[in-house]
Structures are given as C-alpha cells and as structure tokens.
Image (cartoon, rainbow, N blue to C red):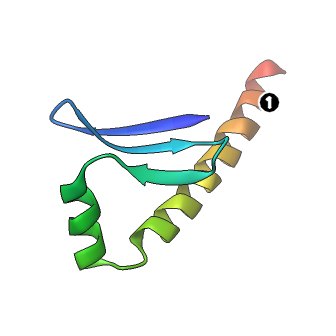
Amino acid sequence: FVTIEMVDEVQVEYYDSNTQRLITKQDWVDQANRDKDPDYLERATENRKGNQQVFKANMGVLKQ
C-alpha cells in the first residue's frame, strides 16, 4: 500500500506499508509542518496506517 501526496505536480509526501512511515520529500514541507505542528509526522503516519487498513478491508469486500 502506497500513498503519494503531490502539490503542483511535485511529490511532497510518501507513505509505504513496508516501512509504515510517512516521509516528506520536500524540505519546505517538513519545515512548514514542524513549525505548525511538531507532532504532524507521527499523527499523519498513524492516519496513513488507518487508511491502509480501511483500503485493505474495502478490497476484501470488493473481492466478494
């Protein structure tokens, strides 16, 4: 499961179920999030993990 966030055709964030970590791809995104909310990466990573589980469940339903 992979999510990629883009802004103006530039990748800014990446989440991969293998690492289970949200990674910022642009320094300015990392700095802006850290300035605004120091816990952003932790919360956003947990959010992506939840999205991963919902997607997995939805795929199970679709297979039926």
| Image x and y of residue 50, in percent | 63, 55
- Residue that badge 1 annotates: 60
Q: Residue furthest right?
A: 64
Element type at mark 1: helix
Q: Is residue 25 left or right of residue 15?
A: left
View extreme (front): residue: 27
Residue sitting nearer the eye, 31 or 62: 31
Which quadrant of the figure contains the N terminus? top right
- Seen at 65% across and 38% down, the residue is 55
The C terminus is located in which quarter? Answer: top right
Give the residue drawn at x 54%, y 35%. 2
For image coordinates 32% across by 46% down, the residue present is: 25
* Residue plotted at (41% across, 37% down): 4
**39 to the left or right of 34:** right
Q: Residues within 10 Å of mark 1 (few under 14, many from 20)?
A: few
- Residue 59 vs 6, above or below: the answer is above
The percent coordinates of residue 6 (x first, y second) are 28, 37
- 46 or 29, which lies in front? 29
Quarter of the rendering containing residue 41: bottom left
In the image, what residue type sits under mark 1?
Answer: Gly
Q: Residue furthest top?
A: 63
Q: How many marks?
A: 1
